[in-house]
Image (cartoon, rainbow, N blue to C red):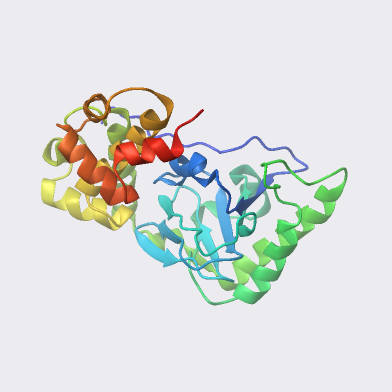
Amino acid sequence: MSEKIVNYEQFEYSAEVPFQILNIYHSENNEDVEGKLQHHWHSELEITYIQEGNKTKHIVDGHQIADTCGKAVVVNSDSIHNILADYTDVGIGDVAATVLIISRSFLKETIPGYEEMYFIPDSDKGNEEIGKIMEKLSQYGTDIDGNPRMKDYDYLFVKGLVYELLHCLMKYRLSWRKDELPINRAKNIERIKGAISYIENHFNEQLSQEVIANKFYFSSGYFSRCFHNALNMTFVEFVSKYRVHQARILLISTDMSVLDIALECGFSDSRRFIMSFKKEYGITPLQYRKANRVA
């Protein structure tokens, strides 16, 4: 198993501000962050509060969660997650969600035994209390251009809100990793992460489920089940989606032909690429290029 599983934090933090607050707006540029919404993991704790809209979905540790208004979705450190974004029921320029991302090192210093804890991703318990705190935090989140709005000594007040939110999570959402992710499942998830990293590094090559299963010490059938349990999609679906998303970048940033892009991204021919692209985006690659071409 040679693929390195990257365990990283998304941002740089300081002692004064060991967190990031991101407001997610419905804007014409939402697709610019599409790659960041694909299956990934990071070492921070992530809490998303849904401000508007009911069409977006989270997939966390293989479970699909409907992002309804007023809901708080928790993504634990190192959990595989994905966002199926759909902001069509959110007004242009409005905040669809507020995301709080908290440094793992701060959490370990603040909460004894943090590494053994697991916060329930989706629960009705404490949503109203958590929501009120997240709404206050959103006032200090990024503006529509991605710029932070915290000034001077705002971090003192905001840090207090973060402590209050962590208290709510401990009160309403606390469980334990050994109970939610038994050791065998945890080991399988780590191997699935290795498989994901391998696919991302070799997406333009021929990829066989059986070969990758063997590479990461699974039988083909067991790998198929574990992969679907972790991502809520099949191996074939994931590979196709990842290739299509990489092709999308080439469509809007190069003059390559559809056939050349198809072959560059691992499709055997343009027909299969067009079918997969249309399934993902609802239009053909050329229609997408015309509508989204970078000037």
**21, above or below 252, in the image:** below
Where does the image place residue 89, in percent across and percent down from the top left? 52, 65
* Near-viewer residue (124 or 272): 272
The mark tally for this picture is: 0
User: Which residue: 43% across, 26% down?
Assistant: 253
Residue 131 placement: quadrant: bottom right
**241, above or below 204, in the image:** below
Looking at the image, residue 74 sits to the left or right of residue 163; the answer is left
User: Which residue: 62% across, 72% down?
Assistant: 171
The image quadrant where one finds the N terminus is: top left
Residue 270 placement: quadrant: top left
* Near-viewer residue (110 or 129): 129
User: Which residue: 41% across, 31% down?
Assistant: 252
Where does the image place residue 29, in percent across and percent down from the top left? 55, 43
Looking at the image, residue 76 sits to the left or right of residue 226; the answer is right
Looking at the image, residue 229 sits to the left or right of residue 65; the answer is left
Residue 218 placement: quadrant: top left
**53, above or below 269, in the image:** below
Where does the image place residue 174, in percent across and percent down from the top left? 54, 67
Visible residue check, residue 42: no
Visible residue check, residue 125: yes
User: Which residue: 51% across, 28% down?
Assistant: 295
Where does the image place residue 180, in percent across and percent down from the top left? 40, 63
